[in-house]
Image (spheres, rainbow, N blue to C red):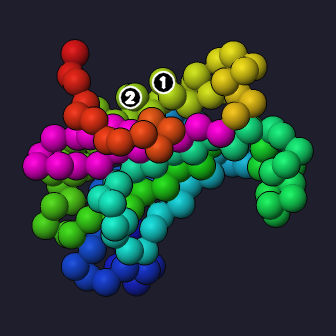
Amino acid sequence: MPARNRRLPRHLSWPLTSTDVCSALGETPSNALMLHFDNVPRTDGTLLRASWMPPIGSNYGTGLCPDMWSSVWITIATVPSGERAAARRILREQALPALREWVDKARHGSEAWALSRHSISWRLVDQSLHLSRDQQPYQPVELP
């Protein structure tokens, strides 16, 4: 992102770009895929988070337009600029392929799964990736 368009202080960077995410998922942002870039680091250390918004009527009362139902919301948090390259490499190698599988499951999985809220998130701890599903405690990612 050009420096003039940055919304971040100089010491912070996003570890992924919208191009990274879209190319890993094989699609472009739309109502079904919402990308958001945080302006500040997350207090829990989460770098990448995806949420599934189910198509249920109770969502409408919380201000979520029905056009946004059955959507995947992806949030990318900031990291210190010196840690960007390492975080980017690990997220691209490990998290983005898993994110693609998760999004496919959200879109093509069972009806029971699709009718409830779900989330998946990753954070970096000592150069290793940790994963959390549906707000459960983070666990180290086991590599194949």
- Quadrant where the C terminus is found in the figure: top left
Q: Residue furthest front?
A: 137
Instruction: Verify CB contact (< 8 Å) between mark 1 and mark 2.
Output: yes
Instruction: Residue 65: tell me if it is visible.
Output: no
Which residue bears the numbered disc 2? 97
Q: The disc labelled 2 sits on which kind of residue?
A: Pro
Q: Quadrant of the N terminus?
A: bottom left
Image coords of residue 58 (percent x, y):
85, 49
**Mark 1–mark 2 distance (CA, rounded to whole Å):** 7 Å
Instruction: Check residue 126 for magenta coloring.
Output: yes
Task: Name the residue located 78 percent from the left edge and 44 percent from the top edge.
Answer: 69
Residue found at x 70% / y 34%? 116
What is the count of numbered marks?
2
Give x and y (percent) for residue 108: 67, 19
The residue positioned 31% from the left and 41% from the top of the image is 138
According to the picture, the residue beneath numbered tag 1 turns out to be 101
